[in-house]
Amino acid sequence: MTERFSDMDTFDRKILDVLAVEGRISVTELARRIGLSKSPTQARLKRLEETGVIRGYRALFDPIRLGRDHVAFVEVKLTDTRESALAEFNAAVLKIAEVEQCHLIAGAFDYLLKVRTASMSGYRLVLAEKISTLPYLANTSTYVAMQAVKEEGLAPAAPA
């Protein structure tokens, strides 16, 4: 069963809003915040997990404190965009730990990668030894981020 945002009611949306900011909140406190008792809140939470709306819980780390404050966005153009080539590229890019995000793009290039490393020299190494060896790679263009103005997890909002 796949649940869609439009299938959720106000209480489901409130649960997601709270969890997006406080993933470790107790069910009792969550229930209090959304205005339901504990049992129905727990049942809703379980349904949201089982239907895949909530895919899991994780800790968010500060990349700067971990020494990974160099961010580069990389436009990737492929030599072949048939489905089999895209699948091979996707499988290979998943193996590069420094690639934090990878998006297939409709536009002048095929993929946009977000790459996080400790330094420019670290990025150059990742580009030379990992990204440049990806299958069907034609060329790349790199844009270095100077500052992250907004970089948080996704908080649910009504679809536009």
Image (cartoon, grey):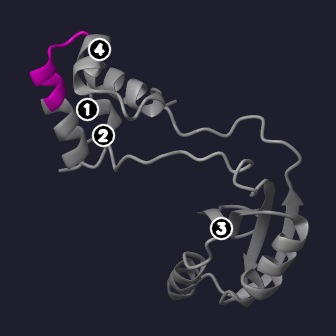
Residue 68 in magenta? no
Pointer 1 or 3: first along the chain: 1
Left/right of residue 52 with respect to residue 114 in the rendered view: left
Helix, strand or loop at disc 1? helix
Q: Residue at x 54, y 45 (%)?
A: 60
Q: Which residue matches tag 3? A: 99
Sequence-wise first label, 4 or 1: 1
Identify the secondary structure beneath mark 4.
helix
Question: How far, Cα to Cα, is label 4 from label 1?
Answer: 18 Å
Q: Is residue 87 visible?
A: yes
The residue beneath circle 2 is 4
Q: Return the residue at label 1.
A: 7
Residue at 65% across, 67% down = 99
Quadrant of residue 68 within the rendered picture: bottom right
Q: Which mark is residue 53?
A: none
Q: Are marks 1 and 2 in contact (CB under 8 Å)?
A: yes
Of the image marks 3 and 4, the number of the one nearer the N terminus: 4
Q: Nearer the viewer, residue 146 or 66?
A: 66
The Cα atoms of the two marked residues, 2 and 4, are separated by: 20 Å
> Residue drawn at (18%, 24%), measured in percent from left and top?
41
Residue contact between numbered discs 2 and 4, judged by CB atoms under 8 Å: no
The three-letter amino acid code for the residue at tag 3 is Val
Q: Secondary structure at mark 3?
A: strand
- Main SS type for the magenta part? helix
* Membership of 40 in magenta stretch: yes
Residue corresponding to mark 4: 34
Instruction: Say if mark 1 contacts mark 3, CB within 8 Å.
Output: no
Q: Work out how far the residue at label 1 is from the one at label 3, CA to CA, in angstroms.
A: 33 Å
